[in-house]
Image (cartoon, rainbow, N blue to C red):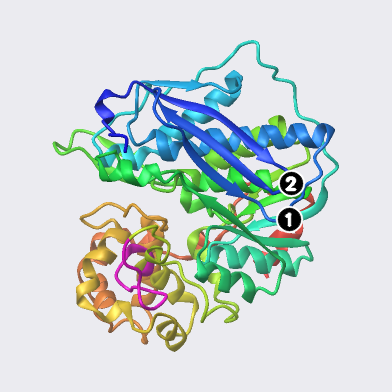
């Protein structure tokens, strides 16, 4: 067994990557210094894949992009001062994309581990590397839609269905909860396998640095590779505009406030940079976008509430998706920030008995839940490090409930009306402005006008 001493490690190496078109298995190889190779595998169903000419070149470019982004899972174990790329070279634009993804995507990880990564992550760019734009591949019109088992991706799937967009719902890993949701859609499915290098778990036991990574960036790259292999022209995620806003962390002495975004790779800055990079460096006719970017979390919740098709199947509770540790017996643990926020976001748009039936209890009538909701409201606490909406959304939702007879007597709502609402600007508690559809997005123009009409209906 190799001893892992992160303080002695000087470099992280992207050794190389390869794809077996006959089996759909991609191997991503990494190492620290001259240590043993860490090999991750990603398996795309549907093989064998016919890869020739421009399509083969696009697959190689997509594979390398995945190799570089997935490396963050291993790099973070030691955060060494040097990054090396052994098997190929990258241009300056790719290096810049990666540095942004690592620095900002590891923002929460750095905060929790007391690190400052700004200016310390440098990917080696080669000036001689060809920066020629990638050609179009004549991809067929079909959307590969990421499904996560929660409300957001189901809203996207149903919107695309209503607009007659051909789609396959895709997910990565072995979650049975996601599988059940995917099968509930009645659409074609694609379950991609991902196996982390087993040494990583041993390194964690030996004191490797650990924490949150930009997993959406990795999953985006996996689906881009799958789209090239399957010859489809769209990779669709379901990240709403609230994902672009982080938690405001105040220094202990109160001197400075820094933003740390748990969901940075779900935000607009990443979507725009990654989507543009894919069209320039992988395939000109491959569109990567989030269907829900023009919406707030509350607007997404309103869309979800319009159908009860998934009430007994969906879950946004992250405890269902942890790699290790205990999972809730039911689909909702009822005590985590995600459970708190989804309950609160749906409450203004859904009959109370239906919502309580989904969760199995009324989270807003439990005084023990007050601290959790305070964090969502950004009241005497910062926004949780979770994929939840902005504080102003939570405050507006709570204010709306405080006006409704069926909710206003519940413990958490009554306490908000009594203690918190009087401290707030009443003009900022209106829910209507938060439901306005935004214009900042990457939805293809031909789809956008129809989508806008669907969302407004």
Q: Please tell me which residue is depicted at 31% across the width and 36% down the height of the picture.
A: 110
Q: Is residue 121 left or right of residue 411?
A: right
Mark drawn on residue 22: 2
| Magenta-colored stretch includes residue 337 | yes
How many residues crowd mark 2 within 10 Å: few (<14), some (14–19), many (20+)? few
Mark found first going from the N terminus, 2 or 1: 2
Q: Nearer the viewer, residue 58 or 217?
A: 58
Q: Secondary structure at mark 1?
A: loop
Q: Nearer the viewer, residue 122 or 410?
A: 122
Q: Give residue 266's position: percent from left, percent from top.
A: 50, 48
For disc 1, the marked residue is: 46
Q: Quadrant of residue 260?
A: top left
In space, the residues marked 2 and 1 are separated at their CA atoms by 9 Å
Q: Quadrant of residue 78?
A: top left
Q: Is residue 63 left or right of residue 120?
A: right
Q: Give residue 27's position: percent from left, percent from top.
A: 58, 40
Q: Is residue 333 left or right of residue 232?
A: left
Q: Are marks 2 and 1 in contact (CB under 8 Å)?
A: no
Q: Please tell me which residue is depicted at 82% across the width and 53% down the height of the picture.
A: 141
The span picked out in magenta is 325-339
Q: Nearer the viewer, residue 12 or 386?
A: 12
Q: Give residue 369's position: percent from left, percent from top.
A: 24, 72
């Amino acid at each position: 067994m190799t001893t892992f001493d992160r303080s002695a490690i000087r470099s992280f190496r992207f050794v190389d990557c390869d794809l077996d078109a006959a089996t759909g298995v991609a191997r991503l190889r990494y190492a620290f210094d001259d240590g043993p190779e860490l090999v991750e595998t990603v398996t795309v169903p549907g093989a064998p894949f016919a890869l020739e000419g421009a399509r083969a070149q696009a697959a190689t470019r997509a594979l390398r992009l995945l190799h570089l982004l997935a490396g963050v899972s291993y790099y973070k174990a030691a955060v060494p001062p040097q990054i090396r790329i052994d098997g190929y070279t990258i241009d300056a634009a790719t290096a810049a994309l990666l540095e942004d993804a690592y620095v900002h995507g590891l923002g929460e990880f750095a905060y929790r581990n007391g690190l400052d990564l700004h200016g310390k992550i440098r990917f080696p760019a080669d000036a001689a590397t060809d920066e020629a734009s990638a050609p179009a591949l004549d991809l067929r019109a079909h959307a590969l839609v990421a499904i996560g088992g929660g409300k957001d991706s189901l809203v996207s799937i149903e919107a695309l269905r209503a607009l007659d967009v051909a789609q396959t719902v895709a997910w990565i890993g072995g979650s049975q909860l996601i599988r059940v949701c995917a099968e509930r859609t009645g659409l074609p499915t694609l379950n991609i396998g991902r196996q982390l290098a087993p040494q990583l778990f041993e390194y964690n036991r030996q004191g490797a640095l650990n924490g949150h990574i930009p997993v959406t960036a990795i999953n985006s790259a996996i689906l881009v590779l799958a789209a090239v292999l399957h010859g489809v022209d769209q990779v669709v995620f379901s990240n709403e505009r609230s994902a672009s806003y982080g938690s405001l962390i105040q220094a202990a002495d109160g001197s400075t406030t820094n933003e740390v975004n748990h969901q940075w790779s779900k935000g607009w800055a990443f979507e725009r940079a990654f989507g543009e990079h894919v069209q320039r460096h992988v395939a000109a006719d491959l569109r990567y976008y989030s269907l829900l970017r023009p919406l707030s979390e509350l607007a997404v919740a309103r869309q979800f509430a319009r159908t009860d098709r998934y009430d007994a199947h969906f879950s946004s509770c992250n405890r269902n998706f942890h790699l290790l540790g205990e999972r809730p017996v039911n689909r909702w643990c009822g005590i985590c920030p995600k459970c708190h926020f989804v309950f609160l976001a749906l409450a203004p748009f859904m009959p109370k008995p239906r919502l309580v039936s989904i969760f199995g209890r009324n989270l807003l009538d439990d005084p023990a839940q007050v601290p959790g909701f305070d964090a969502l409201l950004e009241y005497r606490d910062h926004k949780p490090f979770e994929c939840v909406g902005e504080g102003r959304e939570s405050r507006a939702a709570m204010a709306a409930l405080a006006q409704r007879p069926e909710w206003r007597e519940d413990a958490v709502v009554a306490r908000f009306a009594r203690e918190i609402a009087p401290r707030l600007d009443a003009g900022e508690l209106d829910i209507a402005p938060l439901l306005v559809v935004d214009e900042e997005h990457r939805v293809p123009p031909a789809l956008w006008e129809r989508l806008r009409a669907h969302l407004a209906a």
